[in-house]
Image: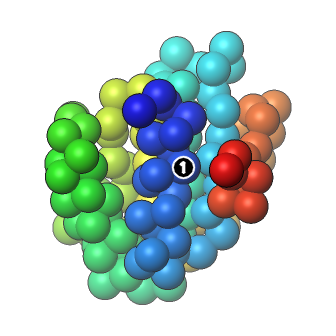
Amino acid sequence: MNNEKLAYFLADVIDDKKGHDIVILNMQGISVMADYFVICHGNSEKQVQAIARDLKDKAEEQQIDVKRVEGFDEARWVLVDLGDIIVHIFHKDEREYYKLEKLWGDAPRLTLESKPS
């Protein structure tokens, strides 16, 4: 699975857990950290943790290496590092504060609606 398809796969997992405002940023040529950021938020700490847990489980089922998960216990901003893709799962309040989409505003934005068939 190429990185774009993997990013959409992860976005679908988030959508299944009712994650909100799912955005995929194509970071290629913009950042050396990752090729894609997947960004979403949950409305509670429990929902943020549920999204992170399910992402980790579904990635491992597909034999995708999860390098690390940061921030799980606090569940305010959970980062799931999959190497070329980094998933940012925010609590709603933290997402509004950090505004990653604005910070990386020059990155092309993809959504589930723009997913190729």
Percent of width and height locating residue 80: 33, 48
Q: Nearer the viewer, residue 10 or 52?
A: 10
Q: Which residue sits at x=51%, y=57%?
A: 11
Question: Helix, strand or loop at disc 1?
Answer: helix
Q: Is residue 66 visible?
A: no
Q: Colour scheme used in the picture?
A: rainbow
Percent of width and height locating residue 5: 52, 40
Q: Residue furthest front?
A: 117
**Where 39 sits versus 4, above or below?**
below
Q: Identify the image quadrant of the N terminus.
A: top left
Q: Amino acid under label 1? A: Tyr
The answer to which quarter of the image holds residue 107 is top right
Q: Nearer the viewer, residue 60 or 45?
A: 60
Q: Nearer the viewer, residue 98 or 50?
A: 50
**Number of other residues with Cα within 10 Å of mark 1, as a class: few under 14, some 14 to 19, many 20 or more:** many
According to the picture, the residue beneath numbered tag 1 turns out to be 8
**Where 96 sits versus 23, above or below?**
below
**Where 85 sits versus 59, above or below?**
above
Q: Which residue sits at x=46%, y=52%?
A: 9
The answer to which quarter of the image holds residue 51 is bottom left
Percent of width and height locating residue 24: 63, 47
**In the displayed structure, does residue 97 sit left or right of residue 85?**
right
**In the displayed structure, does residue 91 sit left or right of residue 69?**
right
**In the displayed structure, does residue 89 sit left or right of residue 73?**
right
Q: Is residue 57 visible?
A: yes
Q: How many numbered markers are drawn?
A: 1
Percent of width and height locating residue 12: 50, 62
